[in-house]
Image (cartoon, rainbow, N blue to C red):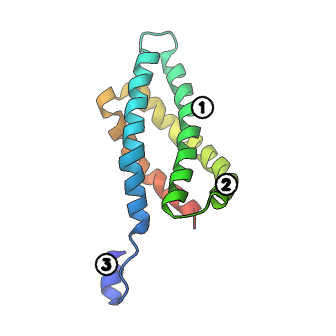
Amino acid sequence: MIKKWKKEGCSQKPDVSGPVRYAIFGFFFTGPLSHYFYLLMERWIPPEVPLAAVKRLLLERLLFAPAFLCLFFVVMNFLEGKAAAACAATMRSRFWPALQMNWRVWTPVQFINVNYVPLQFRVLFASLVALFWYTYLASLGK
C-alpha cells in the first residue's frame, strides 16, 4: 500500500485506520484474553485429566471462540464509530459465517495449540495464525 502510494505520488495520505483498529484489538483484547484463558484452561483441565485433549478443544471451540468472535465484531464496530443498530446488523449478517469458518480454520490449530504448544508460547502461536485470520475477517467487511 505504501509503495503504491509513493509510486503514484498521491497527495492523500494512506488510510491506516484499519490496521490501527486491529492493532488496538490485538494489544488490548486478543493478547490479554488469550493469555488468561490459556492459564485458566490449564487449571480447569490439567493434562492428566482423562480425555484432556478433547475437553480442552471443546472448551475453546464451543465457548471461547464464539464469545471472542462476538467481542471482535462489537469492538470493531465501536472503533469504527458505528451505532448499536449497525453493530447488530453486522452480527446478524457476518457472525454465523465467520464462526463456521473459524471452526474450520482454527480447530486443528487450537488442537495443536492447547495440547502440544507449551503454555508460555500459546498466545504467540495463535497470534501467528491470527495474522491470516484477521485478513479473512477484514475481507468480510468489504
Q: Which class describes the residues within 10 Å of circle 2: few (<14), some (14-19), or many (20+)? A: some
Task: Tell whether label 2 touches label 1 (CB within 8 Å).
Answer: no
Amino acid type, callout 3: Lys
Q: Which class describes the residues within 10 Å of circle 3: few (<14), some (14-19), or many (20+)? A: few
Instruction: Give x and y (percent) for residue 19.
Output: 40, 63
| Label placed on residue 88 | 2
Q: Secondary structure at mark 2?
A: helix
Which of the two residues, 136 or 23, is positioned nearer the viewer here?
Answer: 23
Amino acid type, callout 2: Ala
| Label placed on residue 3 | 3
Task: Tell whether label 2 touches label 3 (CB within 8 Å).
Answer: no
| Label placed on residue 52 | none
Can the viewer see residue 118? Answer: no
Q: Secondary structure at mark 1?
A: helix
> Which is more foreground, mark 1 or mark 2?
2
Q: Distance of mark 3 from mark 2, alpha carbons?
A: 37 Å
Which of the two residues, 55 or 79, is positioned nearer the viewer here?
Answer: 79
Instruction: Give x and y (percent) for residue 74.
Output: 56, 51
* Residue 32 found in image quarter: top left
Q: Distance of mark 1 from mark 2, alpha carbons?
A: 21 Å
Q: Distance of mark 1 from mark 3, alpha carbons?
A: 42 Å
Which part of the image, by quadrant, shows the C terminus? bottom right
* Residue 119 found in image quarter: top left
Which part of the image, by quadrant, shows the N terminus? bottom left
| Label placed on residue 62 | 1
> Which is more foreground, mark 3 or mark 2?
2
Instruction: Give x and y (percent) for residue 141.
Output: 57, 63
| Residue drawn at the location 36% of the way across and 88% of the way down | 10
Q: Is residue 10 left or right of residue 101?
A: left
Q: Earlier in the sequence, mark 1 or mark 3?
A: 3
